[in-house]
Image: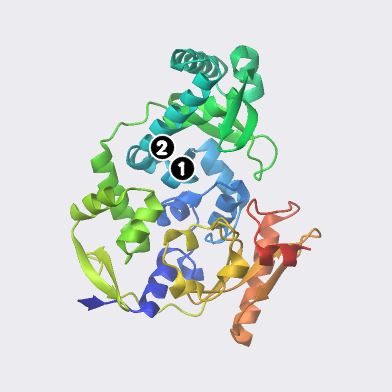
Amino acid sequence: MLHISVDQRRARLAWRHLLVSRARVSDPTAAADALVAVHATDPGSAHLGIAVRSQEPDIAATEDALYQRRTLVRMLGMRRTVFVVPSGLAPVVQAACTRDVAVRERRRFVQFLEDNDLDENWLTGVEAATIGALTARGDALVSELSDDVPELRREIVVSAGKETSTIRVSSRVLFVLAATGHVIRGRPRGTWLSSQYRWATAQEWLGGDVPQLSPEAAGIALARRWLTAFGPGTVDDLRWWTGWTKTRTHAALAALDTVEVDLDGRSAVVLADDVDPLPAPPPWVALLPGLDSTPMGWTGRDWYLGDHRAALFDRSGNIGPTVWCDGRIVGGWAQRSDGEIAYRLLQDVGGDAVTAVEAEADRLATCIGDVRVTPRFRTPLERVLSA
């Protein structure tokens, strides 16, 4: 069995995830494409994750790709998580992952409605009215849609275990419509850190209906893309990243031409045409945002995380802002109220690397400008550094 070393995995990560300075790109869409998809549950993560991989980090360039050129689209994807995805890949993600999420979420929402003496017919009518209102307006905030469709203001009681809460149905209706591919999250209200989006129909936003692919073909295509960006990886890595079942993961991999490889005692796979080693990159450092796609690309993380999990992850498994050096996480960073990028190294990296980290911190601060970034999922080290 072919052995792929940790050093080779780190070399692949450096080049393919655009973390070496000479690998950086000028187009935000190319940056997202290199990672397959960019985490966007925390809106700031997507913009910063693209910026650090850009030759000239520019938040406005990513906004242009999202809202003007629309070569990037924000959508629900793997593991019921919001991602920023190249528009051309959106149908693949929709068919491979989001379609199943939509079925589960709609079924769950209907159960909530039935508990409140409503039914699926009521939901179907509200969905149709909402799409009609969006079509007439072009795009709209939820508050504006609620003027057109008053039923969106209806409140229902939702019980989850022992906890009970009251919610407006508008958030659930738009969530389900987005998951089914009927509507798109557009430009946010306020800054690029806001998650209060304007909504539009997918047909208006993308200039036509989203192509409908078979789940099987889409799953194979997505598995290939993941292996290209993150391979070699284990079956568990791919299963976790996609949110698939074991059966579906094995089926997608079986349809690809792959080679089994050894990762220091762990069995993994790589595309058959991707076994040749990549050259060792020059020394590099990077400051990645919380929930960045690189550290969230595998479930087996020891080869780049080391023993820093407690400081850099929250209790739910969300990673915070990290400092990287030559393919390893070596510390964390945070932005303070005065705009300074503060960092702490958790292991010795040498004087040259420290100088490079300081330069990257200055580069990041310039990119962020007057905005203050607080991760949505806060970790122990980030809280200490931002104080």
Q: Which residue is the site of mark 2? A: 101
Q: Is residue 141 visible?
A: no
Please report the residue visible at 67 percent of the width from the left and 68 percent of the height from the top: 361
In the rendering, at what x and y percent does residue 73 appear?
48, 40
**What mark, if any, has residue 8 been given in the picture?**
none
- What residue appears at the point 45 percent right and 32 percent down from the top-left corner? 105
| Structural distance between the alpha carbons of marks 2 and 1 | 6 Å
* Residue 80: image tag: 1
Name the residue: 41% across, 34% down. 104
* Rendered image quadrant of residue 274: bottom left
As drawn, 76 above or below 322: above
Answer few, some or many: residues within 10 Å of disc 2's Cα (few below 14, many 20 plus, some between 14 and 19): many
Q: Which amino acid, mark 2?
A: Val
Q: Residues within 10 Å of mark 1 (few under 14, many from 20)?
A: some
Q: Position of residue 217 (x, y in %)?
A: 24, 42
371 or 333: nearer the viewer? 333
| Type of amino acid under label 1 | Arg
Q: Do the residues under discs 2 and 1 have CB atoms within 8 angstroms?
A: yes
**What secondary structure is found at the residue carrying circle 1?**
helix
Label 2 sits on a secondary structure element that is: helix
| Residue toward you, 246 or 312 | 246
Q: Is residue 274 left or right of residue 71?
A: left
Camera-side residue of 22 and 17: 17
Q: Is residue 245 above or below residue 161?
A: below
Q: Position of residue 367 (x, y in %)?
A: 66, 57
Left or right: where 264 falls relative to 185: left
Q: Quadrant of residue 156?
A: top right
* Residue under the image location 35 percent in, 37 percent down: 91
